[in-house]
Amino acid sequence: MVEWKYKCSKIIGDLKITPRLISRLFWERAGVHEMKGTYGHKRAVVAGLLLLAVPTADAVGIFTVSGREIFLDGSVFEVRGMCYQPTPVGEDVAAGPPYGDYYTDGYAELWARDFENLRRMNANVIRIYGWTIGADHNAFLDAAHNNGGQSLHLLVSKWINPATDWGSTGAVNALVSEWEAIATELKNHPTVMGFLIGNETNWQENNGDDPEFWVAMNLIAGAVKAVAPDKLVSVAITDALDQVQSRDASMTHLDFWAIQVYRGSGFGTFFSDYAVRSPKPLVITEFGYDAYDAVSGGEFAGDAALPADAMEYLWKELRYNHPVVSGGCVFEYTDEWWKSGSPFTHDAPPGWPAPFVDGEGNEEWWGVFRIVDNGTEPDLLQPRAMFYRLAAIWNEPFPLTFLQAGASDGKLEARFSYPAHLRDQQLQLEISPDLDGWTTVADNSASIYLEPFTPTVVLTSTETNQEVQVTLVHNPSATGPYTPANLLANGDFEYGSTFGWEIFATASSAVARDGTYSLQLDASGDYTAPLNFQTIPASPGEEFNLSGYMYTATPLPADATFGLFKIIFKDLIGDDLPPASVSIGQPAGDPAFPGGESLPMLDATSPVGSWVFSEVQTVAPSNTASVSFFVINIDQSANTMYFDSIEAVEVAEVPEISNTAFFRIINSGR
């Protein structure tokens, strides 16, 4: 008799203490003659599965700053913001009322549509651009607050005429009165974070160079702060760090700097440049990547997958640079058709010059959601890839729900599910014969769904009712090669950027082994050692191979100048560990910098103008928690090196299955 069993467990505690969630499923084969199947169900009912916050009675909405940090009710606050001006098809914000104020009862159907999406993403701030003094916004404010459960905190902006005479006491006092009225209406509502005076007014009319403009802004900010001391106030300006530096000391009433930054798929040196110019907290109040590809004349492929990848890189940079920056507001929630041409059509005239892959930004195409005209009903929304990516990044890893398991024709069959909006969280399906050594047999690195590396595992995914259901079939008798996926994101640099890598660097079109781009590492000499890397979770005993190509256009000097790839293992506290073994390449020569180094290196003996293949293969030692894959230019002398077609894989064979097979699914979040 053959008896099939299954077991699933959710490590709920890991939701708070580790970036990975592991769910397990095992089956055993106890005989070879007669088969009997047993089936079971287990649906997760934990509220945290959907990552909905529990309302808290003591959340009173007091925002403060200290040093470079922003606090809400005494706790450090990360701004996971969305610029929110859900302009319906056919409306022109600039043409007349409501002038972008879509936050009164007449537009309540929009919030019902949108707040659910924003909470699925786990956004906690919405930046709005219009406000009519005296209008009834209570229902909107209360819906955003949601009784303290996943509140959407408001940053309230309102247009200021850039042609204002800043030296006119009457004109400035009129603005003071206007903003005092706004602050009076909102000062006691717990969902309000604060106020952004104007929007990029510094850029228009050369206001940023006018001392009287800054005096007026500080005066207005002080008046707002006097009315609403428990809220924050700032002035939304463009990427003008020279103005930050020259005006920082005099802007005594700003709680933080609110800066809008559009530098393509990375922030470059923005954060380090800001850090030496101001000690104030910083929020990036607009940034993003438009969905329109001016080169192809249409939206980027894959529901605008390239902008989603760029947004992931941008958000990782934001988090990496905390506490210099306290988060940001993604521009924007939906496309806005009114910005050029007719508000009834989705136009794509030539955009403004910008450092995006197509060379321009297109005003009507910034939405995380595209909009579809729905007649007299609220416009329909279609999520782009950026919606799923932000949801994956902003939410904690989720535990999977196991639905059913059993046996049929000598094969394990199981079904499990997870929320569709979190499909971009990084999943790995692993197999083990003994709960000791684990081999990855599928992941979703190359697709929105799990894909297997071995014919012994077949996975079928279907998406319905905001849920992805996966059917797993394991057939131990199936044969075929094990072909693991590349563990690196953007190893060929064909995004035209270093998206996916931890350090912003140059993706050069000067030379490439495959495609158009390669990684360019410029070194100034004296061992500055420019590098880049990616890190993933790892466990003791796992074996990894890192390979790629290196190139120099000029002869390298015969000194300690060389390029290489390197694998470094780390423990839970981040200390480097020497590898258990190195089967390809060589151990690092300096024990102070352990790891496995690739051979051959790019050095004085390497051919000029030719791509050199190099690789290293190592085994993770005891206490391993993560592995980092490095590209390094060691530079006793100044030089430029190029790297391309870089691949990291786990070296493993699918284990032989005897009487028992164990499966587990690891969710590493994003």
Image (spheres, rainbow, N blue to C red):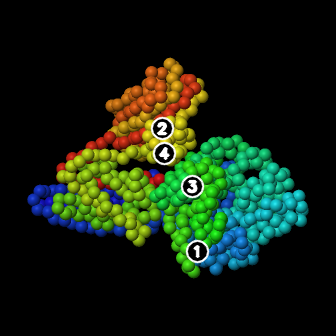
- What separation in Å lies between label 3 and label 1 (alpha carbons)? 30 Å
Location of mark 1 (residue): 110
Q: Position of residue 669 (x, y in %)?
A: 45, 54
Whether residue 588 is visible, yes or no, is no
Of tags 2 and 3, which is closer to the observer? Answer: 3
Q: Is residue 138 left or right of residue 626?
A: right
Q: Split into 4 quadrants, where in the image is the N terminus?
A: bottom left
- Which residue sits at x=31%, y=50%? 453
Q: Position of residue 565 (x, y in %)?
A: 44, 33
Say what secondary structure mark 3 lies in: loop
Q: Which mark is residue 494?
A: 4
Q: Which mark is residue 294?
A: 3
Of tags 2 and 1, which is closer to the observer? Answer: 2
Say what secondary structure mark 4 lies in: loop
Q: Identify the mark nearer the N-term, 3 or 1.
A: 1
Task: Check if mark 3's residue and mark 1's residue have beta carbons within 8 Å.
Answer: no
Q: Give, as a three-letter code, the residue at label 3.
A: Ala
Say what secondary structure mark 2 lies in: loop
